[in-house]
Amino acid sequence: MFGRRSDGRKLKTIPPFFRVIPNIMLERVDSQVYFKQDIILKYMDEYIDKKAEEGIKLSYMNIIYAALVRILAERPSLNRFAINGTLYARNQIFVSLAIKKNLSDEGEETTIKLPFNGTENIFEVKEKLDNAIEQNKNIENSNNTDILAKALSLVPNFALRIAVKFLTFLDKHGAMPKSIIAASPFHTSVFLTNVGSLGIDSIYHHLYNFGTTSLFFAMGKKKKSYVYDDDEIHEEKCISIAFVGDERICDGYYYANSFKLLSKYLRKPELLEEHAIVKTDID
């Protein structure tokens, strides 16, 4: 039915400003905000070493991925999206991740989108993430996103443009087929890319007008940075996380407190061992 989405519910009790701005900034590229932060690695390194002694192998990606799932569960306004001038609360947490099947110029890239209910601890997130990456690194394997992309790639360019415009129209009016939303990495809570694995620093990656992604995080390579910590400026081993977000989903104060919470979890990853209490959005 037009106007009723399968992946989210329309928010009604929202401040007037957030009722208006989705109709002023109609597309995500109109409403992008940028933020970058250096993350000190010594806290994650200490945690990773401690878990290694217990026979548990963790990576920076595991910790950051789990922290993102956690803040989406505890800060539900981050899990909103704006489309066709209307603000929606997403029904579930999804995290999309672009991976290379092999690190070469010719290596195929694929995207995985994993669902979470938000209560997962770091070990449950790690298991789901590691299994998905391992399965999708196999060149012979194709996920639903790959199948959809290959099917669309067979369509002539003029027809493909028409098809994408038609799908965009359906999406804006809440009539996109559930199967396409399920396969689309662009219909996700947050997109994460680890460009550090390519040997470069973090980048500001644009949001997509197609789909509903409101948050994009990019992890960079390890580096030395001067940071202000404990009232002192000193050099630390860090990685940068660059963020691009849709300012229509929440205000700057909410974003700032969410980033502070993310930093807390990256400094104390042991907090992610507990199961989260999922908070619901307004309404």
Image (cartoon, grey):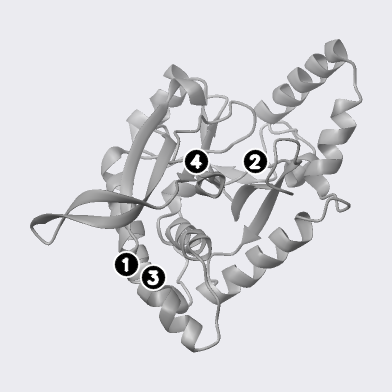
Q: Give coordinates of residue 207: x percent, y percent.
A: 53, 31
Query: On the rendered image, what quadrant is the N terminus found in?
Result: top right
Q: Image quadrant of residue 47?
A: bottom left
- Report the number of numbered marks: 4
Q: Is residue 98 left or right of residue 243?
A: right
Instruction: Please name whichever residue, 65 or 109, is drawn nearer the observer in this view of the structure.
Output: 109
Query: Which quadrant of the structure image shows residue 71?
Result: bottom left
Name the N-terminal-most of marks 1 and 2: 1
Q: Earlier in the sequence, mark 2 or mark 3?
A: 3
Among numbered discs 1 and 4, the one appearing first in the sequence = 1
Write down the residue under mark 4. 216
In the depicted structure, whether residue 178 falls above or below residue 55: above
Judging by the rendered image, the residue that carries numbered circle 3 is 45
Which of the numbered marks, if any, corresponds to residue 187? 2
Mark with earlier residue (3, 4): 3
The amino acid type of the residue labelled 1 equals: Lys
Residue at the image point whose x is 12% and y is 62% from the top:
230
Mark 1 closeness class: few <14, some 14–19, many ≥20 residues within 10 Å: few
Label 4 neighbour load within 10 Å: few <14, some 14-19, many 20+? many
